Amino acid sequence: MTQILPLLGVVVLGFAALAVAYIVGWRAKSGLVLGPIVWMSKKVMNPMQMRTAGTPGAYASVIRHRGRVSGTEYETPVGVVPEGDAFLVALPYGTRAQWLRNVMAAGSATLVHEGTTHQVDHPELIPLATVADRFPASDQRLFRWLRVEDCLRLRDAEREEATGRAA
């Protein structure tokens, strides 16, 4: 028993050090930390999220976009908050995500949110700090922990078009 306690202490200390390194690396947007996280998200988390993404009450919405080079159509789960005639997407991985680069290059995408399909355009990167209060408090805390600084604003093309015609 006396030999197990020091070993257990080393294991706990090791996990604590790993957790600190993970958070520090994420906050710094280190490729060494984000690379494996992005890979795991693509291979494990995204397929699980896609089972319900875009449906009413689901945490994630679905953004449909086309590859810049391949032209292949992709679907990616994203956390979305509606804001007037636009949608906000916080960017915890920073601005290097492939889906984001595809949407920015195309200038438009399709968003499935709460069971409704929206054509979105005019993607704009904005500081998260300017719209952070639109996100749930739990998300805001996570964004602060992970030092999320960027947000994508997507204009709902159909809603803007409808209000433009009505005016």
Image (cartoon, grey):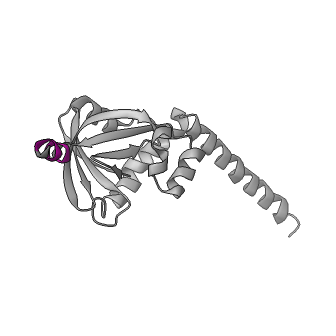
Q: Give residue 117's quadrant in the image.
A: bottom left
Residue 84 at what x, y percent from top left? Answer: 31, 48
Residue 19 at what x, y percent from top left? Answer: 65, 49
Residue 127 at what x, y percent from top left? Answer: 46, 35
Residue 78 at what x, y percent from top left? Answer: 35, 50
Residue 164 shown in magenta: yes
Viewer-proximal residue, 119 or 36?
119
Quick check: 3 left or right of 116?
right
Main secondary-structure element of the magenta-colored stretch: helix
Quick check: 166 left or right of 48?
left
Which residue is pictured at 53% across the width and 46% down the height?
143
Which residue is pictured at 82% across the width and 65% down the height?
4
Which segment did they paint magenta? 159-165
Which residue is pictured at 56% across the width and 40% down the height?
147
Viewer-proximal residue, 105 or 154?
154
Quadrant location of the N terminus in the rendered image: bottom right
